[in-house]
Amino acid sequence: MATEVASESPSAPASGSDVIIETRNLSKVYRDFWGRLKVRALKALDLKIHRGEIFGLLGPNGSGKSTTIKLMLGLLFPTGGRVLVFDKDATDARKNERIGYLPEESYLYKFLNAEETLDFYGRLFDMTAVQRKERIRELIDMVGLDWAKRRPLREYSKGMTRRIGLAQALINDPDLILLDEPTTGLDPLGTADMKDLILRLKDEGKTVLLCSHLLPDIQDVCDRVAILHQGELKELGRLDDLLTVRNELEFRAKNIGDSARREIEEVIKKHGGEVLSVDQATNTLADLFLSIVRESEERPGRRAETEPSKETGAADDNGDSPL
Ligand SMILES: Nc1ncnc2c1ncn2[C@@H]1O[C@H](COP(=O)(O)OP(=O)(O)OP(=O)(O)O)[C@@H](O)[C@H]1O
Ligand SMILES: [Mg+2]
């Protein structure tokens, strides 16, 4: 498969303002206490991430995704190669004012509530009290936590913690947002909200890099993806290019009877094509789940009919059950 790996020259300079992140031959080796080689977490990674794109880092557990993000933030030092962010070396702390970061593990103070948490982080960015108040209101509303904003974070569920983490990452209205597994712990509704938020950030002109091993998360929002495996870049390109199956077409139609279907299959054969599959259309489980939860929010109280028992006879109802 054609990839951009070959076309991107590792030694080319960061091309002005359009390239927001560039990694050149980036490598990371973790060593143990005695300096002995422990893990080669990242091997000679060359990437360019452009302004305004949503870029997905995809890979199985331990493939080097979080390591790459931490190197971009300057939280880790590379063993070899470089990372440039906004044309500055990643170790230059000044660039962090324009970056928002959602780490994979929450590190928020459990005894603060949502408003206090965001106020704390707002102060780190030198925002005035008025600016902070307005931004905090906007962000709490954006991540859907208005109803819980006065509760201490120790009482938050996993999904609520993820949402306040995202709000924290956006407090400084960053131009570049790095999200490490943003949908971890979120239910399908929260996941859909998170994807909407990411797309909204793109509409505002922000650059977003997210990493995940959850394929639908990446597929639904990313413009380009890089696939890592054991610290090596295995694939890089536009998602639509990577996923398009060149010589196959898909039709979806409704109200087609058996004879029309046979006719269509004949036409395909007549033109030298091959019918690969004709299936009854189905929704994904995520679609079903979302539609049920949304309908339940609109019409509270409706409950599903219980499935009729497959057992005949009234053994369950006559009080003779051994349980
Ligand atoms: N502080 C550390 N010390 C030693 N090895 C580490 C350290 N952090 C990560 N590693 C190792 O580096 C490799 C890459 O880890 P990394 O956390 O970057 O993977 P990941 O792709 O983010 O995985 P996951 O999907 O599980 O979050 C793994 O083999 C891991 O064990
Ligand atoms: Mg990780």
Image: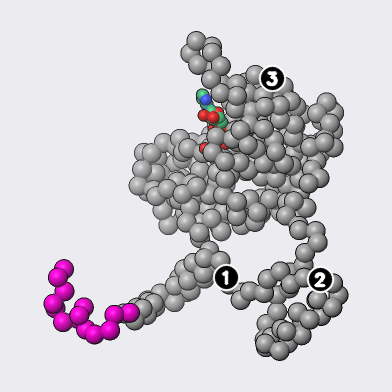
- Residue toward you, 36 or 117: 36
Three-letter residue code for mark 1 = Asn
Asked if the magenta segment contains residue 314, the reply would be yes
Residue 96 showing in the rendered view: no
In the figure, is residue 281 to the left or right of 108? right
Local SS, label 3:
strand
Q: Specify the label residue 313 is tagged with.
A: none
Q: Give the range drawn in magenta.
A: 310-323
Q: Specify the label residue 273 is tagged with.
A: 2
Instruction: Identify whether 185 is placed above or below 311.
Output: above
Residue 249 showing in the rendered view: yes
Q: Do the residues labelled 3 and 1 touch (CB within 8 Å)?
A: no
- Residue toward you, 58 or 127: 58
Q: How far apart are marks 3 and 2 (CA)?
A: 51 Å
Instruction: Identify whether 226 is placed above or below 137.
Output: above
Q: How crowded is mark 1: few (under 14 residues within 10 Å), some or many (20 or more)?
A: few
* N-terminal label among 3 and 1: 3
The residue wearing badge 3 is 80
| Residue at the image point whose x is 31% and y is 79% from the top | 309
Asked if the magenta segment contains residue 280, the reply would be no
Question: In terms of image quadrants, where is residue 251?
Answer: bottom right
* N-terminal label among 1 and 2: 2
Question: In terms of image quadrants, where is residue 260?
Answer: bottom right
| Residue at the image point whose x is 63% and y is 50% from the top | 218
In the figure, is residue 307 to the left or right of 228? left
In the figure, is residue 74 to the left or right of 146? right
Q: Distance between the residues labelled 1 and 2?
A: 27 Å
| Residue 149 x, y percent position in the rendering | 43, 50
Quarter containing ligand 1? top right
The residue wearing badge 1 is 283
| Residue 152 x, y percent position in the rendering | 37, 44
